[in-house]
Every structure is written in C-alpha cells, then in structure tokens.
Image (cartoon, rainbow, N blue to C red):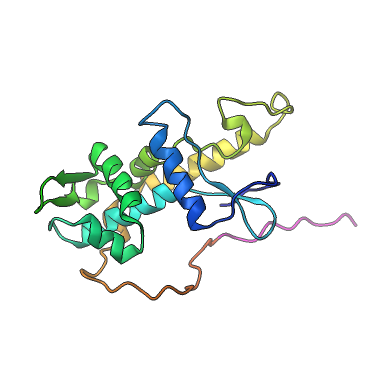
Amino acid sequence: MSIYLKPPDDAPRLTDTCESRALREWTSGGRGGGKVARPIAAADDTGGWRVRLTVFSDYALRVLMFAHAAEGRLVKIEETARAYSISRAHLMKVVNILTREGFLRGVRGRAGGFTLGLPADQINLGAVLRATEPDFALVECFSPDNRCVVARFCGLPDVLNQAMRAFIEVLDRHTLADLGRLPAGFDPLPAQPLPALGPDIAPAPRTESAA
C-alpha cells in the first residue's frame, strides 16, 4: 500500500543516497538514541511521496532469510553484503538491531558470524516489523509533532489505523518459515531490473452513476 502526498522541493529521490540517509536516521535515533526516527517518504517520478516500509526493514527481512538458508551455519557479514549488493556498514547496523532483539545470535571473533536466534517458525514477521519500523507514521497526524490543521475534524486517521491494523495482523499470522528457504549459496542476480511482484491489490470499487 502506498500513499501519495505532495513532497517539498528538496525531497530525496529513491536512490542509494536516500537508503543511506534512512539507515543513518534509524541508527542515530529511535531505539538507539534521542532523535525520532522516521520511515522513508521519498519523492518518486510521479511527483508524489510514496510512503512505504523503511529500507532498514527490507534489509532486516532479507538478512533473516539469508541466515535461514544457512541452516545453522555462522553467516559472515561480508558474504551477506556481497549476495545482496548492500554495503557492509549498513548491514552491520541491521544485524546489530536484529541481534539485540533476539532474532539473530551473534558470535564474535575471526571465526564468528551470525545465525538465527530462534527457530524460523518462531520468528514472527509482525514482531520483526515492530522492531525495525520506527513509528508507522503514515500521515502527519500519526506523528508526536502533529501540526495538521484539520486533525480535529478528520476521519482519515480512523481509516488508516484500520488499514494499518489489518496490515500488521496479516504479518502476525506468518513467520520466517512461511517465506520458504533460499537456496544455499545462491548466485546474486545481475544488477538489472526484474519484474515487479506486487502490489497485488484489487482495482478501486466503481460507483454507479445516478440515472
């Protein structure tokens, strides 16, 4: 689900720079610091803002899937970064949070690495997203610094809260095991666009015009 808003003139595009900034904002605030971390809301080619899960959450789920594929073997940060073409520095931040939350178990030392901290069927996807998403603030009135001038009269928050609860409830019904297991040692795909696999949503309902 994406929500489009008119962006400010200096809104970032969906690029590696945007991903880097999102990760910096998360690791410098939220659970680890005094600043408020915010989800990505980046301008796209339509001229609107596309609100989505943070890149941090995307990376976190991919790291868990990679660890699951290793079947208990200690996974190195370097091999995960190479497989996904993600910088080692960004991946370290993701692994640290997942380890702190108990989803991964880290082993220090030259022969160390990380592995799943729980069986795959006990790693709930909803719990992972609650740990990695900073606030789920889809719109301004979900923010602690709510300055929306129509917030006192608007019914949109109730609708979006229902939508967000439905979204999380689906994730709560699934675990890492439900995502399947990546083939061990899978070869990274070439850096080229692949067919989009979603979003898979029904068209907007049509209303009958008055006769």
Which residue range is magenta in the image?
A: 201-211
What is the quadrant of the C terminus in the image? bottom right
Q: In the rendered view, tell whether residue 161 sits above or below residue 205.
A: above
Q: Is residue 48 left or right of residue 34?
A: right
Residue pictured at 48% horizontal, 57% vertical: 16
Q: In the rendered view, tell whether residue 40 sits above or below residue 35.
A: below
Residue 12 placement (x, y as % from top left):
59, 50
Look at the magenta stretch and give its main secondary structure: loop
- The reply to whether residue 174 is visible in this rendering is no
Q: Within the magenta stretch, is there residue 208?
A: yes
The quarter of the picture where residue 143 lies is top right
Residue pictured at 18% horizontal, 57% vertical: 75
Q: Is residue 107 left or right of residue 64?
A: left
Residue 88 placement (x, y as % from top left):
30, 54
Residue pictured at 51% horizontal, 51% vertical: 18
Q: Within the magenta stretch, is there residue 187?
A: no
Q: In the rendered view, tell whether residue 16 sits above or below residue 191.
A: above
Q: Is residue 195 left or right of residue 44?
A: left
Residue 188 placement (x, y as % from top left):
32, 72
Q: In the rendered view, tell whether residue 81 sits above or below residue 49.
A: below
